């Protein structure tokens, strides 16, 4: 039985960052789920249980014995251990796509002290601007294939509380009891890719910017299938 690809977006953006890849995989005969984490930043911390609930609730529509492949982008990588530990479905593989890695021993901070120092002056009444508003236009524009896709992604982004980035996420023992791999797009994720290689994981490289999955969904889908052996 082919596993179901579960494409988990970063809580800093939205599910539209995975939809082109989902459409490509579906066209190739794969089953795909794209859970929405857009409400994760609501309410009081901690926020990681809401990520777990969002993925688990989405998978209620999938029979319990169906194997899944977890695919996480950006800082969604930090949530993969707690998601994996909470699922009833067998996990056939996990792929970290241009993603942060959980610590070998938890808990893992969502943001480093340097990143928090960068973010704190931006917060207004404890809430941050949308992720793409953190950066200069010269950094943002190359991540998008055109204005229509950019508008969809930008308008969908949540304004997360600063406390989301101040949280620490547990790392349950034995979460990586299945094949894990890493797909690198480019800097600044070279270091996590090197760490993934040091952990003995398969590492692929599809050169591009941080949202390259919306620029080259066919290439991204191909890499996901190759890394997981799901063809």
Image (cartoon, rainbow, N blue to C red):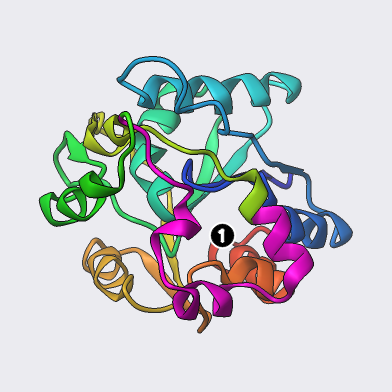
Taking the image as drawn, is residue 18 in sight?
no
Furthest-bottom residue in this view: 207
**Circle 1 SS class:** helix
Residue 176 drawn above or below residue 136: above
| Residue 20 lies in the magenta-colored region | no
SS assignment for the magenta stretch, majority: helix
Q: Which residues are magenta?
A: 126-153
- Residue positioned 60% across, 64% down in the render: 224
Q: Quadrant of the N terminus?
A: top right
- Residue positioned 28% across, 70% down in the render: 197
Label 1: which residue? Answer: 228
Give x and y (percent) for residue 160. Answer: 42, 36
- Residue positioned 49% across, 59% down in the render: 132
Residue 153 drawn above or below residue 90: below
| Residue 151 lies in the magenta-colored region | yes
Q: Is residue 195 left or right of residue 36?
A: left
Give x and y (percent) for residue 146. Answer: 73, 75
Residue 123 drawn above or below residue 218: above
Give x and y (percent) for residue 18. Answer: 66, 54
Q: Residue 117 or 74: which is nearer the viewer?
A: 117
């Amino acid at each position: 039985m082919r596993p179901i690809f579960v494409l988990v977006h970063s809580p800093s953006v939205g599910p539209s960052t995975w939809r082109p890849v989902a459409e490509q995989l579906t066209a190739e005969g794969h089953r795909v789920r794209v859970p929405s984490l857009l409400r994760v930043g609501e309410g009081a911390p901690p926020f990681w249980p809401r990520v777990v609930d969002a993925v688990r609730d989405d998978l209620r529509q999938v029979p319990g014995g169906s194997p899944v492949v977890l695919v996480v982008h950006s800082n969604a990588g930090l949530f993969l251990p707690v998601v994996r530990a909470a699922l009833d479905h067998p996990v056939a593989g996990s792929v970290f796509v241009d993603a942060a890695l959980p610590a070998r021993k938890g808990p893992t901070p969502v943001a480093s002290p340097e990143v928090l120092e960068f973010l704190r002056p931006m917060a207004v009444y404890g809430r941050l601007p949308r992720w793409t508003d953190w950066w200069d236009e010269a950094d943002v524009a190359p991540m998008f294939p055109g204005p229509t896709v950019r508008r969809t992604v930008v308008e969908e982004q949540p304004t997360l509380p600063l406390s989301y980035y101040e949280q620490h996420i547990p790392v349950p023992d034995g979460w990586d009891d299945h094949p894990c791999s890493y797909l690198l797009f480019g800097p600044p994720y070279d270091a996590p890719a090197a760490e993934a290689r040091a952990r003995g994981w398969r590492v692929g490289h599809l050169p591009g910017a941080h949202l390259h999955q919306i620029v080259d969904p066919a290439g991204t889908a191909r890499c996901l299938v190759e890394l997981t052996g799901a063809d």
